[in-house]
Image: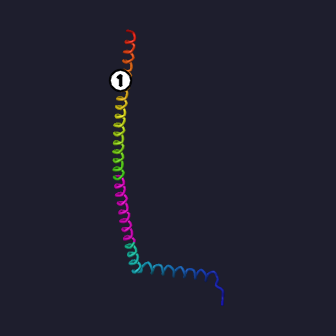
Amino acid sequence: MRTPDLADRLSAAREAKKALLERAKAIAENPEREERRKARQEVVAARNARIAERRAAEEETRRREAAERAAREAAEAAVREARRQQEEEERAKRLAEEQALREVEEADRDAILAARRAGRKARKRKGKR
């Protein structure tokens, strides 16, 4: 058996490259390969369409939920404002009643003081005469 020299190795490498190139050409020209490629493209296109539909549905759901949340928050804010106004009116009414009561008490007190003064004056006048 003889050892291959440089020329033999180069020739073998050239033959191997040629074989690889022919094999690649045969695979590239195979009609089944084109059909498989088209089928894969269709699968990818269908998957992308489903993903787009799902994203659109999720976005619509998010928008709807945001609108519902905004409406709910607006309703809650209106209820809070109505309660606040009612409490404010009740507080104002209570303050007005307290003020009226104070004024009545002050008027009574003034009347009592005036009666006492009048009584003292009357006693002073009686005593001087």
- Figure check: 122 above or below 102: above
Front one among 41 and 25: 41
Q: Residue at x 44, y 78 (%)?
A: 28
Q: Which of the pair 73/59 is nearer the observer?
A: 73
Q: How is the image coloured?
A: rainbow
Query: Any magenta on residue 3?
Result: no
> Magenta segment range?
44-70
As shown in the figure, which amino acid type bears the numbered disc 1? Ala
- Provide residue 103's location: percent of width, then percent of height: 35, 28
**Quadrant location, the C terminus:** top left
Point out the residue furthest to the top here. 129
Which quadrant of the structure image shows residue 121? top left
Residue drawn 38% across and 22% down? 113
Residue 122 drawn at (x, y percent)? 36, 15
Instruction: Give the left or right position of residue 11, taking residue 2 as reference.
Output: left
**Residue wearing tag 1:** 111
Secondary-structure class at tag 1: helix
Work out which quarter of the rendered image holds the N terminus and state it.
Answer: bottom right
Q: Percent position (x, y) of residue 8? A: 61, 83
The image quadrant that residue 115 belongs to is: top left
Q: Nearer the viewer, residue 48 or 29?
A: 48
Specify the principal SS of the magenta part: helix
